[in-house]
Image (cartoon, rainbow, N blue to C red):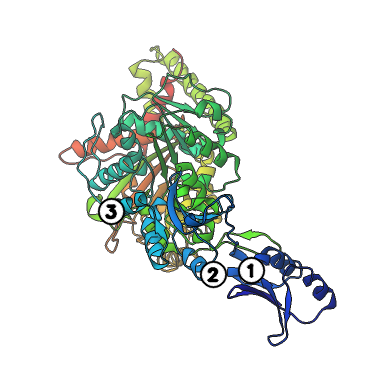
Amino acid sequence: MKLYLDKNEIILDFPFDPTQVAEIKTIPGAKWDKLGRVWRLPITSIDEGRQFALRHKFDVAIDAMRFTVPRMNGSVSPSSSRRVYLKDGMIVMRFPYERVIIKAVKQIPAVSWNSKAYAWTAPLSSVSSVMSWAKSFDVSVDAEISQMASTVESEMSALIEASRSTDAEISISGLSGQLLPYQRAGVSYASNARRAFIADEMGLGKTIQALATLEYVHDSYPAVVVCPPSLVLNWANEYTKWLPHRRVATVTNRKVFPDSGSYDVVVVGYSNISTWEKQLLNHRSYVFDESHYAKTPTAQRTKAAVKIARSAPKEGLILCLTGTPVTNRPNEYASQLDILGRLKDFGGLWGFYRRYCAAYQDSFGQWNISGHSHLDELNDRLRGTCYIRRTKEQVLSELPPVIHSKLVVEGSAQAMKEYDKAEKDIILYIAERARALAIEQGKPQYGAAVAAMIRAEANEHLVRLSVLRRLAAKAKMEIVNEWIDERVNAGRKVVVAAHHRDIVDEIARRHGNLRIQGGMSVDDVEVNKHKFQTLPVGEAPVIVLSIQAAKTGHTLTASEECLFVELPWTPADVDQTYSRLHRIGQKGSVTATYLVAKGTIDEDIYNLIESKRSVVGAAVDGGVFTDDDGAVQLILNLLSKVEK
């Protein structure tokens, strides 16, 4: 049983059923074709025919499901019945119904049927295709559209070329540091497009390009940065690093929002934008980091994101940052294009779904938009309007062998309570020990002599410091898993480095169970390494290393991503760990990411490593540091927190 279109008629082909025959006879214009042994309906009865077919679970041809009968507005004069003109920034195509013309007009990119205007519409970006269609069917085109055709086409071609650019001549005052050439090109593209994706591959510095674009564009403050909650502090740190003169406020809860005028940039997590929607309106610029967080049109945060973005002035900046390219599920781009105010360039929401998502209604009348169609066209249209993307391979010559990335995050609330209690207990213990030594030796409690004695007892305190390191790692586990999943979903393998056995085990169990740690047999280690190196990412996405057990003698070049969940005491151990990835055979640039929980021993260890690295780098003959050196320094740091 099926329904399909044949020339200017609808065909219903089904075995004889008296109930169905009686029902179909009630449809206007229905007639029985004795020769073809099918029922025929006039095209004007398409709606009734479809409803009949769906009720009785017929197979409905795609073109019949999509087809809508154009109806001419009675107020339109005959002279305007075949015309292309401009209205409200859209190209309008009006003509009487003809099957061949309808079929051809559907091939125009981003074209859509406007049931209210009884006409087909397309964005200005489709002007070249509209002109070709009009010429083929002798449809009159207004002079205004003819004049803009070549200009629009040349502008889109220039943007497409710029979207792959790896350098640009721009200068940004006030920036503490130098952008790489491809990052300058990203700033140039985004500042010209104004409302655009920065969609470079992960690790190429989308954050830096976004904040540099805000600084480069005149009158772009105050600005709002919306990002995953785990990255709020990191954005503040990036501003401190690159643009220290900018006043940055962070919103980390639903109780307090900074006063208007007290900041240049306010950073807020996606989970809080609905709460603070009113306060986030009417800023000059908006940046949506990891914009795929707003990929679901019906989600509360997506609705809030669209609303606040629409409050920006016409000349304001709106940027969406995402490392995800156009995939086989382009429907995820629709809401992000809506945030950018670019959806009309793609035919509106349903125009986008029909053209690029192969949208169709199933037998239950539900729309399916999970498909894909015209992906090459979509990619060109994105690049020609609002999308710049470069891959690591394209800019490899500009990248250092190893990119170091510090990611500061908030630990989970419950875990941080446990951490804070443990730290207070340890500080109290060290303070009591210092007091006892001071009394015993007759020396000042916070003097150099007592500090030297505490230093001599460093080994006794290592266990206590280890407790803090482990609790800091526990506080980050949700973010760790999210970070890993994001890269694995993008087709990347990941090496994770940690110290404590239970941390290594927990991460390994969740991500494929490959690990290298003390106590494993040589054979088991080699099997895990071989799987990670040879199997596809879907089968062997992650290998977790115990830093002391795996820092030497292993090759893990299948990955370009090394995540440090816990840090060792010395820069040498850090370097030896990520060097497992960057060895002979590694073609790309390795990114070493250090996940640091704010307000924990993580910050002290990271700063200690950087300090030691500077000393080693400055020394003529290098330098050697032991675990005890790190322990001593951190013990003294804790002692300094005691109120004197």
Name the secondary structure under disc 2: helix
- Which amino acid lies under the numbered mark 2 shown in the image of this protein? Arg
Residue at 59% x, 64% y: name it.
66
> Residue 124: horizontal and vertical position, in percent?
40, 51
Q: Which residue is mark 1?
A: 43
- Which amino acid lies under the numbered mark 3 shown in the image of this protein? Ser
Tag 2 and tag 1, C-beta contact below 8 Å = yes
Q: Nearer the viewer, residue 583 or 377?
A: 377
Tag 3 and tag 2, C-beta contact below 8 Å = no
Name the secondary structure under disc 1: helix
Which corner quadrant holds the C terminus?
Answer: top left
Q: Earlier in the sequence, mark 3 or mark 1?
A: 1
Q: Which residue is mark 3?
A: 154
Q: Residues within 10 Å of mark 1 (few under 14, many from 20)?
A: many
> Residue 417: horizontal and vertical position, in percent?
58, 30
Q: What is the quadrant of residue 273 in the picture?
A: top right
Q: CA distance from mark 3 to mark 2?
A: 33 Å
Name the secondary structure under disc 3: helix
**Camera-nearest label, 3 or 1:** 1
Q: What is the quadrant of residue 265 in the picture?
A: top left
Q: Earlier in the sequence, mark 3 or mark 2?
A: 2
Examine the rendering and report whether any part of residue 497 can be seen: no
Q: Which residue is mark 2?
A: 99
Q: Please count the marks in the image.
A: 3
Q: Residues within 10 Å of mark 2 (few under 14, many from 20)?
A: some
> Residue 244: horizontal and vertical position, in percent?
31, 26
